[in-house]
Amino acid sequence: MVAGVSLESVLARIGEACGRADRASDSVTLVAVTKGRSVQEILALYEAGHRDFGENRAQELDAKVGSLPADIRWHFIGPLQTNKVRLVRPVVTLLHSMDRLRLGAVWMKGPGSPPAALLQVNVGGEERKHGVSAGGAEDAAGELIRLGVPLGGLMTIPPADPERARGYFQDLRRVRDRLVGRWPECGALSMGMTDDFEVAVEEGATYIRVGRAIFGS
């Protein structure tokens, strides 16, 4: 699979989903997930014009950053241990996986203002997944904001059930709408991956995280 060609295909599908939802195509940011991908693969996508890339692992991100162009906008999308914050905080544009108050406290440490973050919500209530409950999201957001975390919205990884994905995305959007009533800056929604990103766009995603559809299996 040629990454540049696949990128065009994914962007076209995003555009079609935006059309169905009466949204502008530029209201959605495509984050190309580069977990396990080589520097050469990332460069091919960069040369095709893409700039937003996402990593799941702090050490893998740290190993790649120095070998790639400085104008890449890095997103961290995986679980983050507090002892790995030092690798992630200086280089990312956005942390998608703020999932606990302790991480928020560590995120606030260090020089300068920290990058923005999204609160991870476990909409399916799955034991093995990170994130706060949908019912606890408003309180968690308030605690993080009181710490000074620049919270920009919400993220979720729903259960692997494409037939029910729309309902999970709608649940997250409803939580987001409650937050925006108190904190207008919390409008972002990071939701949707290779198997369900078009549904996520139709339901209001502002960030989608896609790897396989771009790079292949």
Image: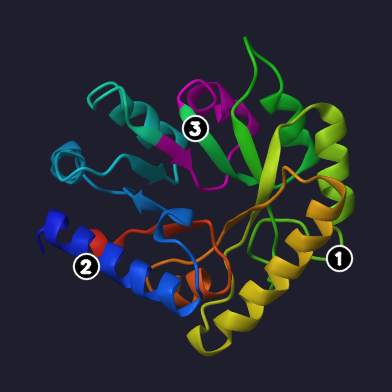
Amino acid at dot 2:
Ser
Q: Nearer the viewer, residue 59 or 40?
A: 40
Q: What percent of the width, then of the height, locates residue 81? A: 61, 37
| Comes first in the chain, label 2 or label 1 | 2
> How far is mark 2 from mark 1, CA to CA?
37 Å
Q: Give the residue drawn at x 11%, y 64%.
A: 1
Residue under pointer 1 = 135
| Magenta segment | 74-91
Q: Which numbered disc, 3 or 2, marks the residue closer to the eye?
A: 2
> How far is mark 1 from mark 3, CA to CA?
28 Å
- Left or right, 161 with respect to 138, comes to left
Q: Is residue 155 above or below residue 159?
A: above
Q: Is residue 79 magenta?
A: yes
Residue 216 visible somewhere in the drawing: no
Amino acid at dot 3:
Thr
Residue under pointer 2 = 9
Q: What percent of the width, then of the height, locates residue 103? A: 71, 35
Q: Give the residue drawn at x 58%, y 40%.
A: 80
Looking at the picture, the colour scheme in use is rainbow
Q: What percent of the width, then of the height, locates residue 59? A: 41, 32
Q: Counting other residues with Cα less than 10 Å from the Cα at mark 1, is it few (<14), some (14-19), or many (20 or more)?
A: few
Q: Counting other residues with Cα less than 10 Å from the Cα at mark 3, is it few (<14), some (14-19), or many (20 or more)?
A: many
Of helix, strand and loop, which one carries label 1? loop
Q: Is residue 134 above or below residue 149?
A: below
Of helix, strand and loop, which one carries label 2? helix
Q: Please give the label number shown on residue 2.
A: none
Amino acid at dot 1:
Gly
* Image quarter (top left, top right, bottom left or bottom right) of the C terminus: bottom left
Q: What percent of the width, then of the height, locates residue 121? A: 70, 59
